[in-house]
Image (cartoon, helix red, strand yellow):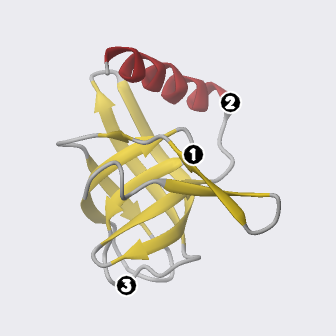
Amino acid sequence: MTQDNHDDREPRNGSSRRRVRRHPIHGVLVAIDAPGVAPKPWVVDAIDINAHGLGLVMPPELQEGTEVRLSFKLEEGLEFSRLPATVLHRVGSSGGVRFASWPDRERLKLLEHLVRLYELS
C-alpha cells in the first residue's frame, strides 16, 4: 500500500476530514498486544507512520475501535514499548492505529525522529 492511499484521517469541523502526511517505513516490525482479544501479541509489518499513529498489516481479529498496546523499534536507541493505541480503520489486510495518550518525553522522541525523516525526504 502506498503513502498516497493510506493516509490517516482526522476529523475537522464535524464530518470533514483532512489528510495527514505519513512516512513509509520498511522493515519495522510491531508487536501488537490486544488484551482480551488474543492470549499473546502478534508481530506484524509496519507500513507507514506519522505523529498520530501507524499503518500496519492488521491481524483479522482486530476490528475498528479495539484498544491495543504497540511495541516497535525505529532505529538503534529508538524503541517504544507498549504504547497505547486504538484501531482506527481497516482496509483489507491493512489498517491504521491511532496513538492514545502517552508520556510527552516518549512522544517527543518520535516527533524528533519524524522531523529528521521529513527533512531527508
Q: Quadrant of the C terminus?
A: top left
Secondary element at image label 2: helix
Return the residue at label 3.
61
Badge 1 crowding class, 10 Å Cα cut-off, few under 14, some 14 to 19, many 20 or more, is some
Marked residue nearer the N-terminal end (1 or 2): 1
Q: Position of residue 13 (x, y in %)?
A: 82, 58
Q: Amino acid at mark 1?
A: His
Q: Residues within 10 Å of mark 3 (few under 14, many from 20)?
A: few
The reply to whether dot 1 and dot 2 touch (C-beta < 8 Å) is no
Q: Which residue is mark 1?
A: 52
| Side of 21 where 52 appears, left or right | right
- Residue beneath label 2, please? 104
Q: Nearer the viewer, residue 74 or 2?
A: 2
Secondary structure type for disc 1: loop
**Dot placed on the residue nearer the N-terminal end, 2 or 3:** 3
In the image, residue 6 sits, relative to residue 114, either above or below, namely below
| Mark 3 in CB contact with mark 1 (< 8 angstroms) | no
Q: Quadrant of residue 33?
A: bottom left
